[in-house]
């Protein structure tokens, strides 16, 4: 299995060395005295989890995390108003080239209104792009028209999941876990449809799934996103609704993008759910990777540095 990192914002590239360090001294100093943003806590704890499971991608015990990264997934894949512009893509690609890393562009779920924006971006970047993560069918076919290789993102790889499974009774937990261990890609017709489009890579989150289908033709490869789980997604944005008196929760054309600086969290934090952009998240810090995922070197763990 190969290790990739996911970067949502160009500013994180400049801080990458800091975000890849386990700052335990700093964390222990503040964890009992301040409310910590979930991403800060997740970043530190997930780094520790990766180091403790270094046999997944480490060739030697002495290699550091930064030396094992094979590529970058770049771009916000949540809100269409945050689709990455050409100048940022070029900066991120230059960083990848300088550091001898593969580069993959990620796209959010796009409405029909934003396909023209995507076409403009791809016209200006298609000469160096290879793979593009897509999360809707309009983007999928647009990427194919430009001769690029699509990867099915989280929103196109359907799976039942629960926000509060840890709260259910022990009697129903086993049934719930069995139900949620299956994904659409197990269906032969599903894999054949996408294989005919030249697609053989799909995305899942860090949850236990039945991976037996990976041994069956047509073969597929897996991207496992870590450490965040997307609990719910909507075109209605609570953050936009707080500040937008005209378009309210649905900023169709112009969005002030307050979500780049502001997030929402549950007051009592009962279920550890928090909102960034127009999506609700939980963290899943313990790695859930079986042998079918780990042994295949074409599978990837996509470590999301920071939301």
Image (cartoon, grey):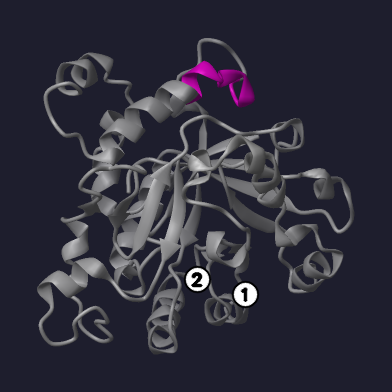
**Residue 65 located within the stretch drawn in magenta:** no
Per the rendered image, the range of residues in magenta is 50-58
Q: Which mark is residue 126?
A: 2
Instruction: Identify which residue is drawn at 64% across, 43% down.
Output: 172
Q: Residues within 10 Å of mark 1 (few under 14, many from 20)?
A: few
Quadrant placement of the N terminus: top right
Instruction: Identify which residue is drawn at 21% across, 62% down.
Output: 259
Does residue 256 show up?
A: no
Instruction: Identify which residue is drawn at 72% across, 52% down.
Output: 182
Q: Main secondary structure of the magenta part?
A: helix
Which quadrant of the structure image shows residue 86?
bottom left
Q: Circle 1 is placed at which residue position?
A: 147
Task: Compute the Cα span from label 2 to label 1.
Answer: 8 Å
**Tally of numbered tags:** 2
Q: Residues within 10 Å of mark 2 (few under 14, many from 20)?
A: some
Q: Examine the rendered structure and indicate whether residue 23 appears above or below residue 134.
A: above
Give 229 or 197, whichever is nearer the viewer. Answer: 229
Does residue 122 show up?
A: yes
């Amino acid at each position: 299995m190969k290790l990739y990192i996911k970067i949502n914002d160009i500013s994180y590239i400049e801080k990458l060395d800091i975000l890849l360090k386990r700052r335990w001294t700093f964390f222990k100093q503040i964890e009992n005295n301040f409310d910590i943003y979930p991403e800060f806590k997740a970043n530190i704890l997930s780094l520790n989890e990766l180091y403790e499971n270094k046999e997944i991608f480490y060739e030697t015990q002495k290699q550091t995390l930064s030396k094992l990264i094979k590529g970058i997934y770049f771009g916000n894949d949540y809100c269409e108003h945050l689709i990455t512009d050409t100048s940022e893509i070029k900066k991120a690609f230059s960083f990848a080239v300088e550091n001898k890393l593969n580069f993959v562009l990620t796209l959010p779920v796009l409405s029909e209104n934003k396909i023209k924006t995507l076409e403009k971006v791809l016209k200006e970047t298609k000469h160096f792009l290879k793979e593009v993560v897509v999360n809707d069918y309009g983007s999928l076919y647009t990427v194919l028209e430009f001769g690029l290789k699509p990867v099915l993102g989280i929103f196109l790889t359907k799976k039942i999941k629960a926000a509060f499974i840890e709260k259910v009774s022990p009697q129903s937990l086993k049934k719930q876990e069995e139900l949620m261990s299956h994904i659409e890609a197990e269906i032969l017709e599903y894999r054949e449809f996408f294989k005919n489009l030249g697609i053989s890579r799909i995305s899942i989150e860090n949850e236990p799934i039945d991976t037996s289908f990976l041994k069956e033709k047509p073969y597929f490869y897996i991207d496992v996103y870590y450490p965040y789980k997307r609990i719910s997604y909507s075109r209605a944005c609570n953050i936009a609704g707080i500040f937008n008196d005209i378009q309210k929760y649905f900023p169709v054309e112009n969005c002030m993008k307050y979500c780049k600086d502001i997030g929402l969290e549950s007051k009592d934090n009962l279920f550890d759910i928090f909102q960034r952009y127009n999506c609700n998240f939980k963290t899943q810090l313990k790695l859930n990777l079986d042998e079918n995922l780990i042994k295949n070197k074409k599978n990837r763990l996509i470590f999301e540095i920071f939301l």
